[in-house]
Amino acid sequence: MPDQNYAPSPEFAAQAVGTADLFDQAEKDFEGFWAEQARTHVTWRTDFDTTLDWSDAPFAKWFVGGQLNVAENCVDRHVEAGNGDRVAIHFEGAEGDTQTITYADLQKRVCQAANAFTELGVRTGDRVAIYLPMIPEAIVAMLACARLGAPHSVIFGGFSADAIRSRVADAEARVVVTADGQHRKGKVAPLKTAVDEAVRGEDSPVEHVVVVRRTDADVEWTDKDVWWDELVDRQSTEHEAQAMDAEHPLFILYTSGTTGKPKGILHTSGGYLAQAAYTNRIVHDLHPETDVYWCTADIGWVTGHSYLVYGPLANGATQVVYEGTPDHPHQGRWWEIVEKYKVSILYTAPTAIRACMKWGADIPAKYDLSSIRVLGSVGEPINPEAWRWYREHIGGGSAPIVDTWWQTETGAIMISPLPGVTTLEPGSAQRPIPGISAEILDDMGEPFTEPEKVGYLVLTKPWPSMLRGIWGDDARYKETYWSRFGSEYYFAGDGAKYDADGNIWLLGRVDDVMNVSGHRLSTAEIESALVSHPTVAEAAVVGAADDMTGQAVWAFVILRGDAANDDEEKTVADLKAHVAGEISPIAKPKSIMVVSELPKTRSGKIMRRLLKDVAEGREIGDSTTLTDASVMDFIKKGMSKG
Ligand code: WT7
């Protein structure tokens, strides 16, 4: 049934949080609509007087005059409302260890951590870096920072020492929170060693490293280090939270752009929290009293920020937090967890769904998944085949799937069906949610609605959880997002088209950004890692379509004269390891081809488009602008050789 779409069932629609009239309300009174969402989903110490100040566009101010404390919204207010006994987190450790953390427990732990950070000298406005596995302390540390108004910068636990050093330096973080190691598929992997390397030296801004005991691995100890338990456990479980301005910075999260230097995406408090909570309610159809919610993302990515920490906790949800991988100790691990906690809402990535598909439907079939009533997808387009498999084998053939399009920069979901309202179209993220406006533009920057024509996705109005800039680089913010089609349009970097029903289909990045398993990588960043290796003279990287990971990293390298005669297989293996070490294992090229030349235009620009044709096994496209058209013949021959 390739063209089948799926209307909501009347039973689901009857209980759904989202309703069709939200679209009309937002249409009629844009600011009034968002003001209402902000007052419904957030508790303000001081109410705001201006919903949106766009006078200094593209630098937005939302809910001006309002004051709030984000951590108080995520924790304390639920305890005060009499829900202190509600489970906030069912923690499922990688080694089978578990913790049940109620909102009352979470409040105590966050207060203790806030007191501990204060003792280390952290003040409102100071930056704190967090480099932790998926353990409760990660969430506690983030909320403690929010409580103090000390913006956090979470660094994904798979990133290298270099990545930590550059992020810590850019944000001038005074404190880093890490652990003595992390559990990975039954083994202990180092974690603190990367921090040690990153904060070494006189010029590091880092004064303290707080170390959570997680694995009992031996670690080297420096005079910056302090154990989390020795520092935090002796603190008072009470802490008086201060109210922050709506626009007080909440966090910085680094993401890949089109250059080698990651961008520190800045998010602030009131608008971010309002949209994270609102979308989590209406898009995931969250009923906090009865649902058990599980977002499988790592806190190192924006999905973990908005839909594991801030959105669900602001809504007082009960959620599962899982430290391990889907296939350890066996390929039914996720479904075992769903059965155990009776998970009702599952939010994950297409790449994980495709992996489960490959392992076979008989694996989830062994578990009772009848608790599931809503499924979500995020990070890359979900192909209709994976969509149908997900609905059939995980969603019992009936759960609505929300394919949610958004970005680190947007902070929260922007384009998605609403379960119970939208007739679902597999493979399409469909329409902007109520309060959000998008269009597709042609090469000339003109909006169009013709079906099947390919253009560029833009957002046409500011939104509460939008990035407030790139940390320390206002010019780059304007240039990257607000100049491609003029200052009226936010350029998302994605290609898109409409179908005949007006649904939006996302077609992948149009810039030099790749999407591998839902992780964002820049070609320039990997190229610069490759050329930092002594054997490499030049490198070109492309993202090529891949059945399993969406895109895969393909690299083409020219070796230096003296390395050109080395064992090629060994060189390639060394280079793969080098990229993994410089950036992260996620960035490791799937294929590296040693070539003698790269296809370049007369102005010296590498024609990545042609390399992509090679990597995807296609006929080579138009190469008439090349300086030397025979280059592509050589590269193709190299391919067939291998
Ligand atoms: C890029 C943003 C959204 C949080 C995780 C990734 C792609 C994201 C979808 C989707 C098609 C998607 C886009 C976007 N993307 N969701 N549902 N359908 N593409 O955040 O690392 O900032 O990456 O991910 O290309 O621009 P991110």
Image (tube, rainbow, N blue to C red):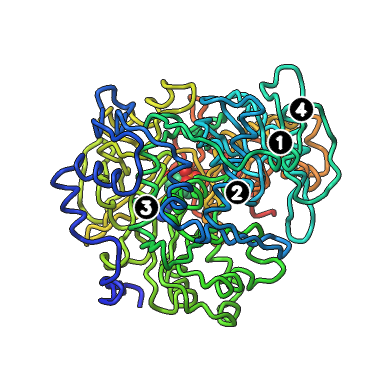
Name the residue at the left extreme: 28
**Badge 1 amino acid:** Val
For the residue with label 3, is its CB less than 8 Å from the closest atom of ligand 1?
A: yes
Between the C-alphas of marks 3 and 1, the distance is: 41 Å
Point out which mark residue 210 bears: 1
In this rendering, position of residue 214 left or right of residue 49: right
Determine whether the residue tagged by mark 2 lies in a helix, strand or loop. Answer: helix
**Looking at the image, which residue is at 45% across and 58% down?**
83
Point out which mark residue 506 bears: 3
> Label 2: which residue?
636
Q: Quadrant of residue 411?
A: top left
Viewport quadrant of the N terminus: bottom left
Determine whether the residue tagged by mark 1 lies in a helix, strand or loop. Answer: strand
The 10 Å Cα crowd at callout 1, few under 14, some 14 to 19, many 20 or more, is many
> Label 4: which residue?
224
Q: In the image shown, does 287 or 81 lie closer to the viewer?
A: 81
For the residue with label 4, is its CB less than 8 Å from the closest atom of ligand 1?
A: no
